[in-house]
Structures are given as C-alpha cells and as structure tokens.
Amino acid sequence: MILRRTVHALAASSLILLSSVSLSTASDKTEIKDYFAAADLSQFKAQVVTTNPSRDEVIVKAPNQNEFAIPVTDGFDLDGVHKNQFLTVSYLAGAVVDIRESKKDKPGIDAVGFVAAADPEDLPAGLSARKLTVTAKILGVDTKNGSVRFVGPAGTERTYKVANLELLKDLDVKKGDLFDVTLFDAVGLEITNR
C-alpha cells in the first residue's frame, strides 16, 4: 500500500555511492530544498532479496515484484539485514533539472552522487537524497503544470516536476526515443520484520 502525504520545503542529506556532488557555485543561489518543495512522500513495504556490501546497497522486491537497489548511508549495518526481511521504503520525488535526448540504446541509471544539505532536519527522518541521471522513455510532458512522466529503468512509471519550465519548451518527444533525465530524489528504509 502506498501512503502519500505532502512534505513542504525539504532539503537533502546524503545518499548513494559514487561521489560527492556540490550543487552550489558562487553564481548559483538555488538551494537543495527548492528541488523538494511540496514533494509527495510515498511509503511501501518491500522484502529483502539480498545485500550488496561492495556497493552499500540493499536489493529489495516491491509489492509489484520489481526488484531494485536501495543505497544505504555510511554507518548502516548491512550485516543486520537478512533475506526475506520486510522493510518500509520511503521515497520522495524531487525535481528534474535537465532533460536531453540520449545516445544510449536502453534504459539505465548513470551518474549518481551524494547530495549534502546545510540542515539535514529539512528532510524527513531516515531519508537521504541524491542527484542522478536516468535513461528513460518519456510518456508525457505537461507544460502547463511543469511536469514530465516517464518509465524508469526498473519499469516503474514516475511523474516529476521540472525545476525550470524552459526544459520542456523545445522538448521533442517521439515514440520510443530515450532521454537522459537528471533529477533529485530521496530514499530511506526501515526494517520492520512484518
């Protein structure tokens, strides 16, 4: 069951594995919390398939039977996670910050990086945020409400707000075309055992 509630003025702490991403420059005054303003928090139960300690991930199976990796933060006890345990997964869709036609021939996840916030309390407890690029098929563009709908690499349909409406202005979407979509999101997990 997916629970939804509105979360206002959120920011980001840290997540996933590759490298730190600094999003502020002297000329960029946008704060991370702006990418999560009025975002919807989804929560659902998932079951542990396995862990991947080399990548600091827990592989879970969602209620729709899709399997995907959830990165964990430093200090998370992966040894305490066992196959078939139940978890509550929390997911927060941030904003899309870039969309470009892809040169790749299949969906996937590319550049993933840690995102740090000045005030970690701006994010719901237990959630960490990331900036990532996914190669996906775009299903629809809503220029009026400033959102884009696409099917992610795991086959899950998602709708994200865009940070800048100019991203959608000249977007030419043809059936079957793949796009590299750079976005912010946040995820967390809690072991529930039931």
Image: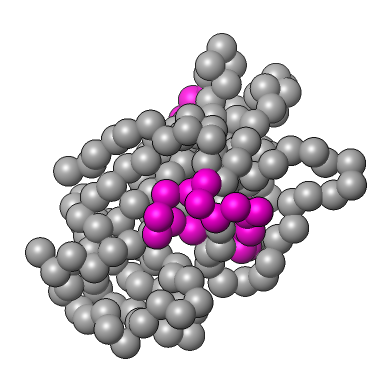
Residue 174 vertical position relative to residue 10 in the rendered view, above or below:
above
**Which residue sits furthest left?**
194
Task: Tell me, yes or no, if residue 88 can be seen here.
Answer: yes
> Residue visible at 73% across and 23% down?
166
Residue 160 vertical position relative to residue 57 in the rendered view, above or below:
above
Residue 27 placement (x, y as % from top left)? 89, 41
Coloration of the structure image = one colour
> Residue visible at 63% across and 59% down?
116
Using the image as rendered, state which of residue 33 and residue 185 is in the foreground.
33
Task: Tell me, yes or no, if residue 153 can be seen here.
Answer: no
Q: Quadrant of residue 164?
A: top right
Residue 13 placement (x, y as % from top left)? 56, 58
Q: Is residue 154 left or right of residue 134?
A: left
Residue 103 placement (x, y as % from top left)? 68, 50
Q: Quadrant of residue 183?
A: top right
Residue 110 vertical position relative to residue 26 in the rendered view, above or below:
below
Using the image as rendered, state which of residue 134 and residue 6 is in the foreground.
6
> Residue visible at 42% across and 49% down?
124
Q: Quadrant of residue 173?
A: top right
Q: Is residue 101 left or right of residue 3?
A: right
Of the 4 image quadrants, the one containing the N terminus is: top left
Q: Is residue 125 magenta?
A: yes
Of the 4 image quadrants, the one containing the C terminus is: bottom left
> Residue visible at 60% across and 41% down?
33
The residue segment tinted magenta is 113-141
Q: How many marks?
A: 0
Residue 91 vertical position relative to residue 74 in the rendered view, above or below:
above
Q: Is residue 88 magenta?
A: no
Using the image as rendered, state which of residue 57 and residue 150 is in the foreground.
57
**Which residue sits furthest top?**
144
Residue 56 placement (x, y as % from top left)? 46, 78
